[in-house]
Amino acid sequence: MFEMYVTEIYCSSKNCNVRESQVRTKDFGDNREPKQWHCPACGSKAKVHWRRTAREHEVEELKVAVVRVNLALLLRESGADAVPMSYLMLDELPASWQCVHPPIDQTERPIA
Ligand SMILES: [Zn+2]
């Protein structure tokens, strides 16, 4: 068994168009993780911005998605050209955008 990770790397080469890349890896707990990451486009050494478990990444991505939706709704509905800082801290969608379906029972057997 292994744990899934997501690592964001950064290429600082002035000759490369790539800046950030996200790489999904399996961690078998036996130090197979690269000691040095390289840009997938140019092969230059890349810096690690962050590394998260897949579950941590999923939680962070959901937070980012909620903020983006709230900002888009604010801009669309108010016509504002500036966004209050408080909108960057919202962690829920407006009630009209929240899921009306009951939560999925994770213990239920999936349909094949
Ligand atoms: Zn590069």
Image (spheres, rainbow, N blue to C red):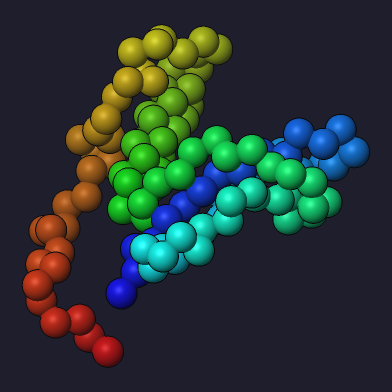
Horizontal placement of 39 versus 71: left or right?
right
Q: Quadrant of residue 45?
A: top right
Residue 18 x/y as whole percent: 76, 43
Q: Would residue 45 be visible to someone looking at this image?
A: yes
User: Quick check: 92 above or below 18?
Assistant: above
Specify whether 58 is left or right of 39: left
Between residue 91 and residue 69, name the one nearer to us. Answer: 91
Q: Residue furthest right?
A: 15
At horizontal 83% and vertical 51% (from top left) the residue drawn is 42
Q: Is residue 94 visible?
A: no
Name the residue located 73 percent from the left edge and 55 percent from the top edge. Answer: 40
6 sits to left or right of 10? left
Q: Pinpoint residue 57: horizontal percent, then vertical percent.
A: 38, 47
The image shows residue 16 at horizontal and vertical percentages of 85, 42
- Identify which residue, 89 or 20, lies in the foreground: 20
Residues 91 and 96: in front is 91
What quarter of the picture does the C terminus occupy?
bottom left
Q: Please give the name of the residue rendered at 76% of the width and 34% of the height, measured from the top-left corner.
A: 12
| Rendering quarter of residue 41 | bottom right
